[in-house]
Amino acid sequence: MKKDILEIIKEGIKSVDPLLCINRSVRLENDILIIKEKRYDLREFENVYIVGAGKASAKMAFAMESILGDKKFEGIVITKYKHLYKTRKIKVIEASHPIPDENGIRGTKKIIELLERAKENDLVIVLISGGGSSLLVLPKQGISLEEKKKTDKLLLECGADIEEVNTVRKHISQIKGGFLAKKAYPAEVVSLILSDVLGDPIDAIASGPTSPDPTTIRDAIRVLERYDLKEKVPKSIITSFKKGETPKPKDKIFKRVSNFVIGNNKMALESSRKKAEELGYNTLLLSSYIEGEAKEVGKVLASIAKEIYYSDHPLKKPAAVISGGETTVTIRGNGRGGRNQELVLSAAIQIRDLDICIASVGTDGTDGMTDAAGAIVDGNTIKIANKKGLEAREYLDNNDSYSFFKAIDSLVYTGPTNTNVNDIQVILVK
Amino acid sequence: MKKDILEIIKEGIKSVDPLLCINRSVRLENDILIIKEKRYDLREFENVYIVGAGKASAKMAFAMESILGDKKFEGIVITKYKHLYKTRKIKVIEASHPIPDENGIRGTKKIIELLERAKENDLVIVLISGGGSSLLVLPKQGISLEEKKKTDKLLLECGADIEEVNTVRKHISQIKGGFLAKKAYPAEVVSLILSDVLGDPIDAIASGPTSPDPTTIRDAIRVLERYDLKEKVPKSIITSFKKGETPKPKDKIFKRVSNFVIGNNKMALESSRKKAEELGYNTLLLSSYIEGEAKEVGKVLASIAKEIYYSDHPLKKPAAVISGGETTVTIRGNGRGGRNQELVLSAAIQIRDLDICIASVGTDGTDGMTDAAGAIVDGNTIKIANKKGLEAREYLDNNDSYSFFKAIDSLVYTGPTNTNVNDIQVILVK
C-alpha cells in the first residue's frame, strides 16, 4: 500500500503543476490571448508586463513564456529560495519565506517600478501563488523591515487566526490587499492564481494583491486590540494606519482587473482520486476543506479508516479516502515537525495492527521547518518504533514528529515541487 | 432541516432501546432460552439470577423479565439516579454516576451476595451497559470509597487515557476486570452488553466485569509511574496490588462465561442513516469510531459538510452524513457544556451562512454535566447569536457551550433515554 499511496499523492501534485494549470487555462490563438472565458487581443496592447510572487511563480513565469513565445513582453517574479525555474526573459528574484527579507523588498520595489510604467493600453499579467505574502513585501513608508517582522511575529504568536493576521498585514503594506492592482492602474490586469487557501478566497491568497480588500483599518485596529497588541507593536504601525485605506470593491481600478483561480487543492484531490481508482481502490473524495489541530484531524481520519476496515463503511475495501486542506499545530514542545507529520503520527497510534496506510504531504514539498514533505504510516509503524525504543505519544507531545519518522525511515521527500495547493491526505484500507 | 435532523437522531436512539436490543438477541422457546447463537435449557438450571449495572440496566432488566415471563428467577441491578424503569421482580438500586457513592457500594455488595449463592447448576445473566463502571463499585479491602474517589480524580486529571485509567481501576476493585464472573463461578454466566466504548471491547465496557482482563498489576503500576502518581495516590492503593491479579484469559472461570454485545453505536447510526434515506437524503455512514478533541472534530465534520455544499462531494445534495463515537473535551475555561455541545459550537463557526445543519447528541440523553443531550446548529446560528451579543469563540474558549445554546434556544433535550451507546452526529446539507 505504501507504494500505491505515494503514487496517488505524486499524481495529485503533478496535476497542479503550474505548467499544466496555466496550459489548461491559457492559450494563444494568433494574436488573441484567451484566459479562461476572457479574450485579450495582444494587438490592442502596447506592452505586456508579467509580475508575480509565490512558491510557484518561477514555473508559472516559464509557462507564460512558453505560451507567449516570441510576443513582446517583459517581467519580474519573486520566488522562494531554491524554488527557481529557468526562464528566458522574465527575471526571477529569490527571497525568503516564510520570514521576509531584504531580497523580498528589493524584488517588490522592482515590480512596483515596472507597474508604474504600465499605461492604459498595457496589459499586466499577475502570477500569484501561495507564499506570495512573505515574498511580495513592502511595508508602508516609515515602517522598517525589522518593525514589520516584529509585528508579524506578535500576530502569529498571539493566537489570532490567519484572517486576522492578514487584516493587519494588508493595512501596513504598499502591495498587499489590492495595492498591486492599484499600482498597475490604469493598465488592464489579469491575475492567474494558484490557490493555497481553503475555498480559494482571492482576497486571502498571497494577501490578495489584485483583490479588493473587504477589511478596513478599523478591523485592523480591532485585531490589535483583541490581542492586546496595540501597545506592543512598533509605533510606526499605528501611524501608518493614517496613510489611508486599502482599495475597496467599488474602487474603479477593479473595473480593469480580472482574477482567475487556475489551480487548487480540489484539482489535486480529484487527480489523486482518479489514480487510486486506476489502482483498483474504491474511492471517496472526503473534503478539500480539512482544517483543525493536526493531531486531532489525524484521529478523525483514523476513525474513518477503522470503520472501513471493520465494516466496509462508507466504502468497501480495498478503499481509498482522499482529503486535503490545511491543518494547524499548536506548539507545546520543542521538537521538529510539520502539520502533515504530526497528523499521521497521531493517526498511527489509532491504526496500530490494522491493514491501513495513511499519508499526508504538503504539495509544495515542505512540511513545517523540515526538509520532508510529510510522512507515511501503517499498522506496523508503532510496532517498528517501539522496537527502536521510540514512544509515539512522547514524540507527539513534544511536537517532534520529524525525529520520530526520521528514525524509522517514514518521511516522504519530494523536494520543492514548484507548486503549492496545501496538503493532501490519503487513507488506504485493505 | 432541524426537524429532519431531530427525527433522524430520535430514530437512531430508538433503535438501541434496551427493550429492542434484548428482543433482537434473546428469545424463549418453551424452556429454551436462546441468546444469539447459544441455547440455555432452563430445565437444566436450578436457579436463574439476573444482575447488572449501567444507565440502561433497569430497562434491560424489564426486557429480560418480559421474556422470562413466569419462569423462576430473581435479580438485582444498579442504575443511575433518575434512570429507573419499573420492573416486577428484579430489584433496581439507584446510585451515583459518574462519581460513585455509598449506594453503588451497597448495591454491588448485594449483587455479590447473590452471586456467591450461585452454584454449578445455576445460570447468571449479567446486564451490562455504559456507566456500569461507577455504579458497580467495590474497592479492594482496605481501600475506602474516599480513597477510591481520590484515585479516580488523580487519574482523570493527569492526562492518562481511559484505557490507562481502567487498568488501574480494575486492579483496585473486587468486581471489575472479570471479578464479577469469578464471584459467579462455578455457575454458567451469560453477559448481555450494550456497548458505549468504540469498537465494543468487552474488557472495557463498564470496566469488563465478565471479561478476562488483558492488563496486569505491573501495567497498573506503570500507569501510576508514568503520570507521577505513585506517591500521590493513597497508600492503600499500592498495598491492594499485593492482593493478587485480575482473572486472566486462560482462567478456567471463563469456560462458563459467554459475552454478547447486543447493541452499539453502529446500530444506532445505521438506523439514523435509514431514516435519513427515507426522508429523501443521500446518505453516508462516515464512522462509528469518531474520537478526538470535540471542537477539532467539529471543524473536520464542518469541512466535510462544506465540500458537499460547494461541490456535491462525497455526496450529492440533499445529503446526510451520519457519524458517532466519543469525543473528549480538554477543560480550559470554567463554563458549562458537554462534548456534543462543544463539537457543534465549533462547527457552527465554520458553516456560517451556509445551508448546512449539524447536530450532536449523547444517546443516553445527557451531555457533560448539563440537562441537555446535545445541541443543533445551522448557517444562521452565529448570526442569531451575534444579534444577542454572544461571541461563539469566547464561549468555546471558556468551555461554556451550554450557556451559548441556552441563550439561543438550540439545545436538544431528550431526558434519560435508558440506553447508552455514545454519541450520534448528523450533518444535513441542502
Image (cartoon, coloured by chain):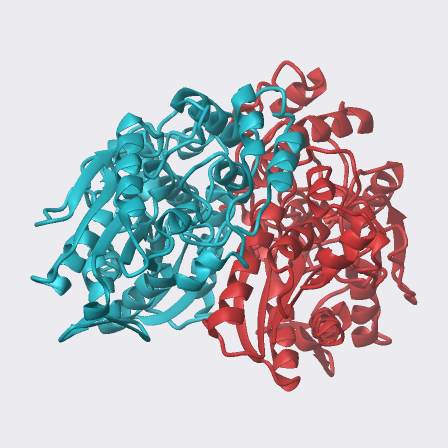
Chain colours: A cyan, B red
From this view, report whether residue B292 is shown above or below residue B220: below
Where residue A229 sits: x, y (%)?
A: 61, 25
Q: Quadrant of residue B293?
A: top right
Regarding residue B264, the answer to whether it shows in the image is no
* Residue toward you, B41 or B163: B163
Residue at the spot 85% in from the left edge and 43% down from the top edge? B96
* In this rendering, position of residue B401 left or right of residue A392: right
Query: Residue A199 location, x and y as percent?
Result: 46, 59
Of A139 and B231, nearer the camera is A139
Decide which of A267, B340 is in the foreground and name it: A267
- Specify the quadrant of the image occupied by residue B41: bottom right
Q: Is residue B186 above or below residue B9?
A: above
Question: Could you say where residue A200 lies in the image, as x and y percent from the top left?
Answer: 43, 58
* A347 is higher (above) or lower (below) than B255: above
* Relative to A286, residue A403 above or below: above
The quadrant holding residue A391 is: top left
Report the residue at 58% width, 18% height from top.
B228
Q: Is residue A169 visible?
A: yes
Give residue B387's position: percent from left, percent from top. Answer: 80, 54
Q: Is residue A99 left or right of residue B108?
A: left
As drawn, is A161 to the left or to the right of A256? right
Point out the image quarter for the N terminus of chain A.
bottom left
Residue drawn at (40%, 41%) of the image? A175
